[in-house]
Amino acid sequence: MSAGVRRLIINADDLGYDPAVSEGIVLAIRSGVVTSATLMVNMPHSGHGATLARGLPVGLHLNLSRGAPLVPGFPPELLRSGAFDESLASALPAEVVAAEAEAQLVRAEALLGSAPTHVDVHRHLHRAPGVLAGLAEVAARRGLPVRALDAAMRTELRSTGVRTTDHFVGEAGGEAYWTETRFAETVGQLPEGITELMCHPGYPPRLTRTTYGLQRAVELATLTSTAARRALAGAGVTLGSFAYLR
């Protein structure tokens, strides 16, 4: 990559979480600055999200924190009432994660009609060593990039032959993260190389109970705004998808 070049992948997490969320994500790609999304494949509304996003750059949002596993015979002691539980994720062995990641990738390809572009993990559960190791094994075999949250994770992934971006920015919490002001400040200060910007745009969920709804609407407004496009143009940032890492 030429010196001084700054490339940005803007990825929307949680496609398939709820119909309203999926509709907002697809709008943010088609009419906004979002360039990529990741699909949850074990949720009741996964098929709806995949149908809306067919033909767009979509990866897998590996889900080990809610819903049921896709692998038959998933160890019951690592589930709660037959479903994933986030509090048990740190105990997941690499081989169990690898099997579930492979199953979710197969489901993603079937739903999307094309291979997923990359993988990230719902709730960043690949901070757990077993989750990261299992995911890296499958990603390396399939040649898929994986989201790295920090320098240590980036080094670990690359040591196993898994591609990832040079930098990562984004957060989710009680308040909407990507306001117009924060977005403009962030893109104006991007370092050289390829950065992934994680976001959560969407309309407030209408069928899924959650406290994380209005935050999505704020991010959707930001990422479809004229101000966002102006900030990117002013910073001289080039937008793209995970095709940058092929």
Image: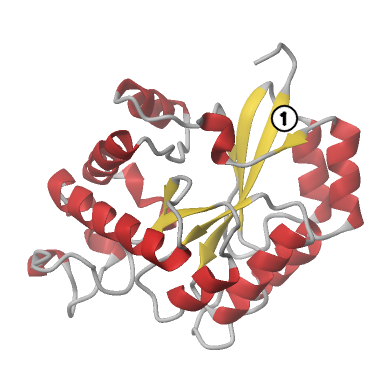
- 226 left or right, relative to 59: right
At 30% from the left and 63% from the top, the residue drawn is 86
Relative image position of residue 32 (x, y in whole percent): 78, 57
At 38% from the left and 67% from the top, the residue drawn is 41
* Residue extending furthest toward the bottom: 207
178 and 99: which is toward the camera: 99
| 86 shown above or below 245 | below
Q: Residue 135's quadrant in the figure?
A: top left
At 46% from the left and 26% from the top, the residue drawn is 151
Colour approach in the figure: secondary structure
Number of residues whose C-alpha sits closer than 10 Å to that of mark 1, classed few (under 14), some (14–19) or many (20 or more):
some
- 166 left or right, relative to 204: left
Q: Secondary structure at mark 1?
A: loop
Q: What residue is shown with label 1?
A: 190
| Quadrant of the rendering where the N terminus is positioned | top right
**In the image, what residue type sits under mark 1?**
Leu
Relative image position of residue 229 (x, y in whole percent): 86, 48
165 and 142: which is toward the camera: 142
At 39% from the left and 23% from the top, the residue drawn is 155
- 130 left or right, relative to 198: left
Q: Residue 74's quadrant in the figure?
A: bottom left
